[in-house]
Image: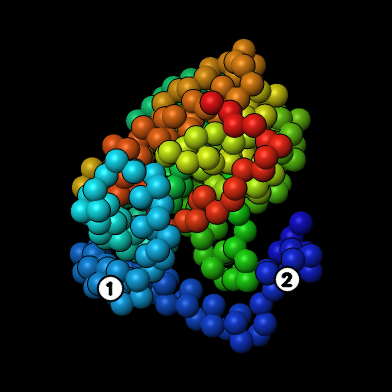
């Protein structure tokens, strides 16, 4: 389904003329910002933090509730410290994501170290596609640079942006900068099947912590709360027997990160139902508890309540 078809089927994707002009103007401004050096961008981030945190108070209530519900054992002061560090990182992340547009290969190679890609490349040599389950922790947008180190053709799964075609094109450009391919979430299964038929070896990448509909059949405890997850990644892994990796993003220092690929399952067909998703959830939870300030707490991850007819998987 092309962008125009989405607009016809879902009014939330529609843009009137004025909104389209404003969105294009904003994206042009962001492109201009991307050419500024990091030292200037981080000065802007420091100022942006004051506005976002104290003036706009961006999603303050959502962030606070998410943190309190996820860490009931922490004091008010500890929650406040995590919240403050989250806002600072969030502003850095916003500008770092914009910077992808203009950053050179040499510059990002100095700022992003990649570990574990050799194991994935071994599977390529064996004629096997792979799956990488990531999450919204640290700087996930810089993952697009991984394509320069992997033999597989990366398929980046994403949710189309509603009512802002210019922004979607901007983000797609950044995510495909090093040769990977963006695939809308609703086309995931179809695309995987097509590539398998063509025998094209792919690396399916997706942030598996995105929020599905409340009627998702898989609910488990994640960060002390009942949480639904998409079952698609597990179903694809089992049906295709593609090895499953967990993507661990670490922040080394401001503007410097490390991505590590940790093998979870080499032969998914041999595992029990829900074992892949449970392993992902537990690993994600472990990472978040180590560095809670770098998770996307502004996302309304727990907006749904589990239907009574759906059992909790533990």
| Quadrant where the image shows the C terminus | top right
The answer, for residue 296, to whether it is visible in the render is no
Q: Earlier in the sequence, mark 2 or mark 1?
A: 2
Residue at screen point 42% across, 30% down: 283
Q: Residue tagged by mark 2?
A: 11
- Residue 291, label in figure: none
Numbered label tally: 2
Query: Looking at the picture, how far across and down is residue 274, in whole percent?
Result: 60, 25
Is 262 displayed left or right of 75 in the figure?
Answer: right
Residue at screen point 41% across, 52% down: 66
The answer, for residue 253, to whether it is visible in the render is yes
Considering the numbered disc 2 on the image, is that residue within a helix, a strand or a loop?
helix
Query: Looking at the picture, how far across and down is residue 156, in whole percent?
Result: 56, 45
In 3D space, how far apart are the residues under numbered discs 2 and 1 (Cα atoms)?
34 Å
Classed neighbour count for the residue bearing mark 1: other residues with Cα under 10 Å, few (<14), some (14–19), many (≥20): few
For residue 172, which quarter of the picture? bottom right
Is 96 displayed left or right of 44 in the figure?
Answer: right
Query: Looking at the picture, how far across and down is residue 194, in whole percent?
Result: 75, 36
Classed neighbour count for the residue bearing mark 2: other residues with Cα under 10 Å, few (<14), some (14–19), many (≥20): few
């Amino acid at each position: 389904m092309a962008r125009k078809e989405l607009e016809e089927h879902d009014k939330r994707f529609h843009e009137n003329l004025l909104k389209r002009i404003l969105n294009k103007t904003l994206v042009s401004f962001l492109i201009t910002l991307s050419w500024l050096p990091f030292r200037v961008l981080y000065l802007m981030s420091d100022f942006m933090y004051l506005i976002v945190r104290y003036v706009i108070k961006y999603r303050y209530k959502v962030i606070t509730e998410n943190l309190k519900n996820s860490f009931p054992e922490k004091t008010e002061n500890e929650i406040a410290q995590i919240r403050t560090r989250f806002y600072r990182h969030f502003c850095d992340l916003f500008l770092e994501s914009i910077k992808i547009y203009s950053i050179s290969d040499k510059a990002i190679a100095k700022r992003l170290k990649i570990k574990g890609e050799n194991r994935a490349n071994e599977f390529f040599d064996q004629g096997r596609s792979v799956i990488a389950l990531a999450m919204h922790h640290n700087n996930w947008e810089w993952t697009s640079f991984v394509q320069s180190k992997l033999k597989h053709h990366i398929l980046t799964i994403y949710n189309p942006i509603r009512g802002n075609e210019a922004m979607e094109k901007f983000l797609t450009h950044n995510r495909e900068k090093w040769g990977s391919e963006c695939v809308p979430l609703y086309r995931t299964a179809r695309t995987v099947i097509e590539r398998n038929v063509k025998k094209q070896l792919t690396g399916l990448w997706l942030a598996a912590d995105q929020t599905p509909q409340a009627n998702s059949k898989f609910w488990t405890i994640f960060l002390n709360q009942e949480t639904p997850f998409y079952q698609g990644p597990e179903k694809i892994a089992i049906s295709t027997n593609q090895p499953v990796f967990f993507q661990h993003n670490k922040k080394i220092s401001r503007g410097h990160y490390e991505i590590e690929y940790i093998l979870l399952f080499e032969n998914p067909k041999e595992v029990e139902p829900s074992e892949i998703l449970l392993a992902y959830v537990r690993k994600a939870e472990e990472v978040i508890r180590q560095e809670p300030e770098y998770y996307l707490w502004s996302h309304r991850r727990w907006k749904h309540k589990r239907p009574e007819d759906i059992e909790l998987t533990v």
